[in-house]
Image: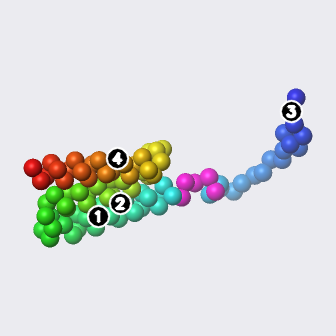
Amino acid sequence: MPSKRDLLEEENPSNGPDRSEFQWIRIFAFTIGVSITVLYLWINPFQYIPDWTAAAIGAVPVVFLLYSFSSQSWQTCAKIAAGVAIGSSLGTFF
């Protein structure tokens, strides 16, 4: 049996998309990830700091872009980025 709310539900016409349904945190993470990637490539940290450190810093935009495109939590994305940073720094160091 339908509830009163279901019976009285009114059609609410909208003129555009409902902006409250957008995932603004993920949109912001994508914007920051692209910005950091461009900045990383423009600065080229390999000429200023040791190679293994510059390779580890390269994981920072990865965490933002991964979070923006996946449905994972930010903690999971941060753990993945930490693994990428450790792996790339060890691979560059040895």
Drawn side of residue 6 relative to residue 62, left or right: right
| Disc 3: which residue | 2
Q: Position of residue 50 (x, y in %)?
A: 13, 64
In the image, what residue type sits under mark 1?
Answer: Val
Q: Earlier in the sequence, mark 3 or mark 4?
A: 3
Q: CA distance from mark 4 to mark 1?
A: 21 Å
**Nearest the eye: 60 or 13:** 60
**Disc 4 + disc 1, Cβ < 8 Å:** no
**Does the magenta-highlighted stretch encompass residue 17?**
no
Q: How many C-alpha atoms fall within 10 Å of the one at disc 4: few (<14), some, or many (≥20)?
A: some
**Disc 2 + disc 1, Cβ < 8 Å:** yes
Q: Secondary structure at mark 2?
A: helix
Instruction: Please give the label number shown on residue 57.
Output: none
In the image, what residue type sits under mark 3?
Answer: Pro
**Disc 3 + disc 4, Cβ < 8 Å:** no
Q: How many C-alpha atoms fall within 10 Å of the one at disc 2: few (<14), some, or many (≥20)?
A: some
Q: Is residue 23 visible?
A: yes
| Disc 2: which residue | 34
Q: Secondary structure at mark 4?
A: helix
Q: CA distance from mark 3 to mark 4?
A: 46 Å
Q: Earlier in the sequence, mark 4 or mark 2?
A: 2
Q: Quadrant of residue 5?
A: top right
Q: Secondary structure at mark 3?
A: loop
Instruction: Please give the label number shown on residue 38.
Output: 1
Q: Earlier in the sequence, mark 1 or mark 3?
A: 3
| Disc 4: which residue | 80
In the image, what residue type sits under mark 2?
Answer: Val
Q: Is residue 69 visible?
A: no
Q: CA distance from mark 1 to mark 3?
A: 54 Å
For the magenta stretch, what is the residue range?
20-24
